[in-house]
Amino acid sequence: MALDVHLFPCRSDNYGFLARDVETGVVAAIDTPDADRILEELERLGWGRLDLILNTHWHPDHTEGNERLKAKTGCEIVGPEEVRRAAPLDRVVGDGDTVAIGATRLKVVATPGHTLGHVVFHAEEAGLAFVGDTLFALGCGRLFEGTPAQMWDSIRALAAWPEATVIWCAHEYTASNARFALSLDARPEMKAHAEAIFAARERGQPTVPTTIGTERRFNPFLRAADADDFAARRQAKDDFRG
Ligand code: ZN
Ligand code: FE
């Protein structure tokens, strides 16, 4: 039930993820922002196989590589029905289902908001989750399809996980998110957290993964008082030019 997770930058600000089940050697790609980059990283890691793709939602920067990766490796593509709007999908999963990467089991949790069919994959025993564009370090996804109330419920369900849960977010938006967080939160610990993020980005280091504990302390969306406050914060972030 241990997963080796490898993260690599793709496109302008996406992250690609390859996850290998330590016990069985089974390998999964979580989302497919760039097929060539994913094949390159597989080669570099020497993992030698791609067994499955797990898609979080239909957006092209998460599904564009499905077709080419399947053609190259014969992998199975698993995700929510909405993926078919943009790319091939072999097996539909939804809320409450379980998927396996070898011996590691991941629970599928529906998180409507960014898109209506968005799902996240939670490996409870391994203590980690792939959350696509639902939750970001200090941020959350834009509401392209869902309502603020839906997204508020979605991110609060994630916030109820154990604090140590490692959260793999699909974009590097953290510096911009931190500037927005600072506009709402004057605590010295918020300032220190933001400074650490700016410094990491200046060194060219990723700020992903984060943890549920960190996000509960600092994420301005999780710190909203209620659904209305969340809606106001989401709108303010859309309009924020920091
Ligand atoms: Zn998206
Ligand atoms: Fe995205």
Image (cartoon, rainbow, N blue to C red):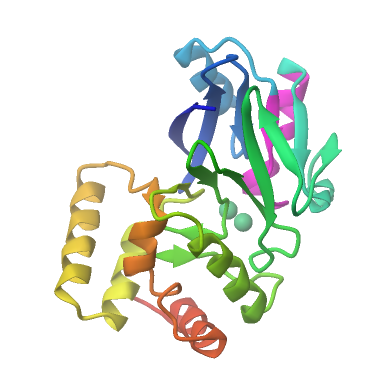
Residue 187 percent location from the top left of the image: 19, 77
Along the viewing direction, whichever of 129 and 15 lies nearer the viewer: 129
Name the quadrant of the N terminus.
Answer: top right
Chain part drawn in magenta: 52-72
Residue 67 percent location from the top left of the image: 77, 31
Name the quadrant of the C terminus.
Answer: bottom left
Among the 4 quarters of the image, the one containing residue 7: top left
Query: Does residue 4 show up magenta in the picture?
Result: no
> What residue sits 72% from the left and 16% below the top?
73
Ligand 1's quadrant is bottom right
Along the viewing direction, whichever of 47 and 213 lies nearer the viewer: 213
Q: Is residue 173 visible?
A: no
Q: Is residue 130 visible?
A: yes
- Vertical comparison of 76 with 83: above or below: above
> What residue sits 39% from the left and 45% below the top?
209
Along the viewing direction, whichever of 23 and 9 lies nearer the viewer: 23
- Vertical comparison of 236 with 83: above or below: below
Residue 15 percent location from the top left of the image: 48, 42
